[in-house]
Amino acid sequence: MSVDRDGGLPAPRTPRGYLGQDKGAQIVQKPVIQGPVIQGWCPGALRPMPSGDGLVVRLRVPMGRLLPDQAAAVAELAARHGSGVLDLSARANLQLRGVTEAGHAPLIDGLRDLGLIDADVAAETRRNVMVQPFWQPGDASARVAADLLARLAAPDAPDL
């Protein structure tokens, strides 16, 4: 061991790691804070969004409730015209994934026959009403939601 100029022992050498950083030093990364990343638009049934696996068709189920026969029919349509994958979004919408361009029109026809889509893109875009899950026909929740949905579907409803 050598002695430094002042006669004392030299400071221990710190082993160097990747890019000259001390191996014992902790690497602290500062968080990157940014606003939301908008990747496009909110897809709908009438205006789907392309993704890596085909089109994403978002179904805004009226009053947030599917009847058992509607659920079975949606699953069958998803398998026939897409990948068969159904996602439930954070806002309780149903997403059909992997829909092909050629399969989109027949899918829309099937969803329309089930009464699950709006008349046009503008109405679809406005209508995204969440209803408490335990509503019953005729109760206050159902009456308020039905009135709101009717007003949003009106031709003179404001764009949102």
Image: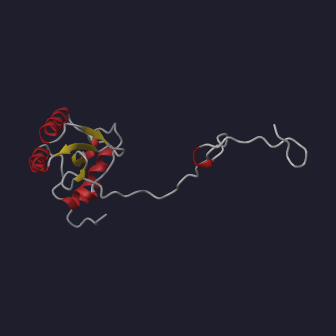
Q: Is residue 157 above or below residue 108?
A: below
Residue 55 or 46: which is nearer the viewer? Answer: 55
Quarter in which the N terminus is drawn? top right
Front residue (pair 54, 106): 54
In percent of width and height, residue 110 lies at: 10, 44
Q: Residue at x 36, y 44 (%)?
A: 90
Q: Quadrant of residue 157?
A: bottom left
Percent x, y of residue 106 = 8, 47
Nearer to me, 140 or 119: 119
Return the residue nearer the eye: 31 or 14: 14
Residue 35: image x %, image y %? Answer: 46, 59
Task: Give the side of residue 2 with respect to residue 118, left or right.
Answer: right
Tally of marks: 0
Toward the right, the furthest residue is 7
Who's the residue at 30% across and 55% down the image? Answer: 42
Q: Position of residue 17 (x, y in %)?
A: 61, 43
State which quarter of the image contains the C terminus.
bottom left
In the displayed structure, does residue 32 sit left or right of residue 36? right
Q: How is the image coloured?
A: secondary structure
Name the outermost residue toward the front: 2
Who's the residue at 30% across and 58% down the image? 41
